[in-house]
Every structure is written in C-alpha cells, then in structure tokens.
Amino acid sequence: MKYCCPLITVKELERSRYLFETVLSQSVIADYGENLSFEGDFSLHLKEHFSSLIDGKEIISGRNNFELFFEHDELEPIQEQLKSLGLEFLHEVREQPWKQKVMRFYDYDKNLIEIGESMEHVAKRLYREQYSIEDICRFTYMDEKSVKEAIKSC
C-alpha cells in the first residue's frame, strides 16, 4: 500500500487554486477538473463533487483538527498579502516555544493553514541574535551538528 496525500475540500476551486498557486507558490501537477494535485503532495477537491462521491454526506470545515503546513522564511510579507485577501487568521506571526516563528490562517473554506520558518532559518536567526550553539540546540531541539550546518553561512 502507498500513502498518497491529504485531500481537502473547497467550495470554489479556482479561488482556492489562486491562493495556493499564486500566494503560497505551489505548483499544480495535475488538473482533473474537480480535483487539483500539487507538487507538495496535497490535493484540493471541489466540495460539491466530493460530497457526491461520499453519498451526499455533509462536509464540515473549520474544525481545527487538520492543517496544511508550509515553510517560508520571510513571513511578514506573506502575512500582509493574506490580509489583503481578507483571509481570517487564527493568529498572526508569533514565536512558538521552540523559537520558530509561525502564523496560522484559514483558507476560504476554513481549512487551517500554517506557514512557519524552516528550522535551519530559526537556527540562523537565533545565532545572529547572539544565542550560543548550546542555547539554540536547547530551544529548538535540533542536534549540534544540524545547528552548526545551518549557521555555517552566517
């Protein structure tokens, strides 16, 4: 058996495609009309069509029990772009206990999306902020070798 990808349902496929393709820089690898597959191994499916495939069962969005996670090291410009689209934020950019900066927002169908810094970027940022390698390892749970590899270009 082979696991393929998560599939989320959306009310308006073209509007969602714009968000994922243009704003979140994801590439469509297959367009099946009611279903899009993206290079990052996830799919969007037109909610109305998907409901017909599951015998008309109700599809309830916005339960915060699932999210798609993306990495990007410059969060503030994306946050402003998402705000300009009128998307609702669960929270704006903030720091997690392990020092990674992330934001969480809902797509047009109340699916939860997270964008966070890569952990390599976190290590570099903390090093530039004068944290020791030992402290970076302790905060981020990264091993010393990974931290040293991440900061070698600083």
Image (tube, helix red, strand yellow):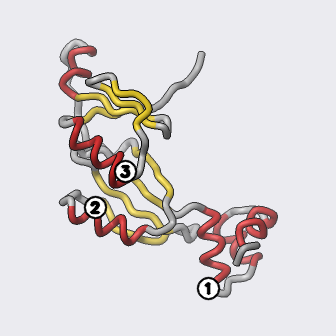
Q: Amino acid at mark 3?
A: Ile
Q: Residue at x 26, y 14 (%)?
A: 53
Separation of disc 3 and disc 2 at Cα?
A: 11 Å
* Residue denoted by label 2: 82
Secondary structure beneath dot 2 equals helix
Q: Residue at x 74, y 68 (%)?
A: 147
**Amino acid under label 2?**
Leu
Q: Residue at x 48, y 30 (%)?
A: 5
In front: label 3 or label 2: 2
Q: Amino acid at mark 1?
A: Glu
**In the image, is residue 5 above or below residue 26?**
above
- From the top left corner, tell me how far across and down residue 18 is, in percent: 27, 46
Q: Which residue is mark 3?
A: 113
In the displayed structure, 135 sits above or below 57; it is below
Q: Residues within 10 Å of mark 1 (few under 14, many from 20)?
A: few
Work out whether residue 139 or residue 116 is closer to the camera in this orientation and state it.
Answer: 116
Picture quadrant where residue 38 is located = top left
Q: Report, in whole angstroms, how far the alpha carbon at label 1 lies from the one at label 3.
A: 28 Å
Mark 3 and mark 2 residues within 8 Å of each other at the beta carbon: no
Mark 1 touching mark 3, by CB under 8 A? Answer: no
Q: Reading the chain from its start, which is encountered first: label 3 or label 2?
A: 2
The dot on residue 153 is none
From the viewer's perspective, is 74 left or right of 88?
Answer: right
Disc with the residue nearer the chain's start (1 vs 3): 3
Residue at x 68%, y 83% (from the top left corner): 131
First reached walking from the N terminus: tag 2 or tag 1 = 2
Q: Position of residue 60 (x, y in %)?
A: 23, 34
Determine the image quadrant of residue 65: top left
Residue under numbered circle 1: 129
Q: Nearer the viewer, residue 78 or 28?
A: 28
